[in-house]
Image: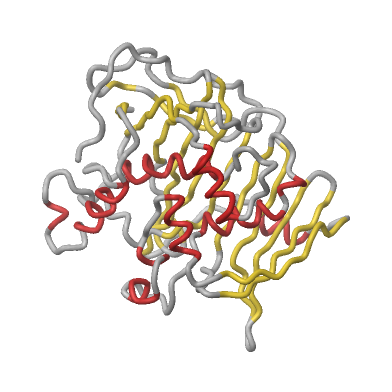
């Protein structure tokens, strides 16, 4: 696997413009733009020494309604890694435009509580394409290390819509969760989600996809109104049960139907032993929509992802490897700190 080290956080707006440019007929044939077709890139991006800004965390907590008792919400780390996700999908080796991709599943593992003093090293890669009834899917794999310790992992599954094929059984555990008998209802809440939620979350996350910002721009992509970010809905749900979360946990969600803004939604969380299952629904005059289903489980050992990186910072692209680890795998070491800087992603 080729490894590319970035010298600083990617600028998200130019990456959006690069991916949007592929919608112009024939633009995918231009050098440096994604959309040439073929396989997913065998590429790993690394960004070291990323600080956690307390002011930005406070703004994020306010938008997603996490209590101030949580120093760094587990979902906030996704925001820090989002620029790397965009850089990978805007790379010239990426087979299609990121415009129109659907976020279908997300799993985050927090191995210990994060602190604002932590400085993180991120590793991001993608999995090969897999068949899905509505097209093809791939996953963006992310790990975060602090002082050589694996502290956080994420797996974001994205759908590229098209002609469908066979697919593997659902892996999120949501269908099994729905069949469980719960011992305790933790909370039931009704939320009003304002029309400006997408703009507010976009300001704190950097994700200013036009489908989330205004009804007019959302209509250009087939939505009657702007829709809430999937990761805002996940963060908002976890914030509502933050007092119930253990120090180390895995949280998986499946995004089902988008939340059209403004909205009135219902949140419910139930506990069975150490497992918390939660749902986000809306109730219309004629139908009920399930927007999100999720599960939180305690996590006592490193899970999800492992990333093996070059021991030294490469002068050019080098070979590394990424692989998934079992839930009992040993904690991987962070990439060794390099002696010199190299160029960032192509612009």
Q: Which residue is at a point 58% across and 69% down the rendered structure image? A: 193
Q: Is residue 346 above or below residue 139?
A: above
**Quadrant that contains the N terminus:** top left
Q: Which residue is at a point 50% across and 56% down the rendered structure image? A: 167
Residue 103's x, y, as percent? 46, 56
Q: Is residue 311 above or below residue 100?
A: above
Residue 271's x, y, as percent? 81, 53
Side of 50 relative to 242 (left or right): left
**Quadrant that contains the C terminus:** top left
User: In this figure, what is the number of numbered marks?
Assistant: 0
Residue 110's x, y, as percent? 62, 36
Side of 169 relative to 343 (left or right): right
Given residues 224 and 193, the one toward you in this image is: 193
Side of 234 relative to 182 (left or right): left
Q: Residue furthest front?
A: 55
Q: Which residue is at a point 56% across and 25% down the rendered structure image? A: 150
Q: Which residue is at a point 63% across and 38% down the rendered structure image? A: 71
Given residues 118 and 183, the one toward you in this image is: 118
Colour setting: secondary structure
Side of 127 relative to 179 (left or right): left
Given residues 39 and 110, the one toward you in this image is: 110
Q: Residue furthest right?
A: 183
Q: In which quarter of the image is residue 165?
A: bottom left
Residue 253's x, y, as percent? 60, 54
């Amino acid at each position: 696997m080729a490894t590319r080290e970035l010298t600083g956080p990617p600028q998200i707006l130019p990456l959006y413009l690069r991916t949007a440019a592929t919608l112009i007929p024939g633009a995918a044939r231009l050098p440096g733009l994604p959309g040439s077709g073929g396989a997913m890139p065998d590429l790993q991006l690394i960004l070291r020494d990323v600080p956690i800004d307390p002011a930005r965390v406070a703004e994020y907590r306010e938008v997603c309604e996490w209590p101030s008792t949580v120093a760094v919400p587990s979902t906030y780390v996704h925001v820090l890694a989002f620029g790397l996700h965009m850089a990978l999908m805007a790379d010239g080796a990426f087979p299609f435009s990121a415009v129109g991709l659907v976020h279908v599943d997300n799993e985050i593992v927090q191995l210990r509580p994060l602190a604002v003093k932590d400085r993180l090293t991120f590793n991001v890669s993608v999995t090969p394409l897999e068949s899905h009834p509505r097209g093809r899917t791939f996953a963006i794999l992310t790990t975060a290390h602090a002082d050589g310790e694996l502290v956080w992992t994420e797996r974001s599954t994205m759908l590229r819509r098209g002609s469908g094929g066979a697919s593997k059984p659902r892996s999120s555990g949501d269908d099994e969760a729905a069949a469980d008998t719960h011992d305790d209802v933790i909370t039931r809440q009704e939320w009003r989600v304002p029309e400006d939620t997408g703009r507010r979350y976009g300001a704190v996350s950097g994700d200013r996809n036009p489908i989330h910002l205004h009804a007019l721009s959302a209509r250009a992509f087939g939505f009657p109104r702007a829709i809430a970010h999937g990761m805002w809905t996940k963060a908002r749900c976890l914030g509502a049960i933050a007092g119930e979360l253990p120090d180390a946990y895995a949280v998986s969600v499946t995004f089902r139907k988008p939340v059209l803004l403004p909205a009135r939604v219902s949140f419910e969380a139930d506990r069975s032993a150490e497992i918390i299952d939660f749902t986000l629904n809306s109730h219309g005059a004629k139908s009920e929509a399930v927007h999100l289903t999720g599960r939180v489980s305690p996590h006592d050992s490193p899970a999800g992802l492992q990333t093996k990186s070059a021991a030294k910072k490469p002068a050019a692209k080098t070979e590394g490897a990424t692989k998934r680890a079992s839930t009992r795998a040993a904690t991987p070491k962070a990439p060794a700190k390099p002696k010199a800087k190299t160029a960032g992603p192509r612009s």
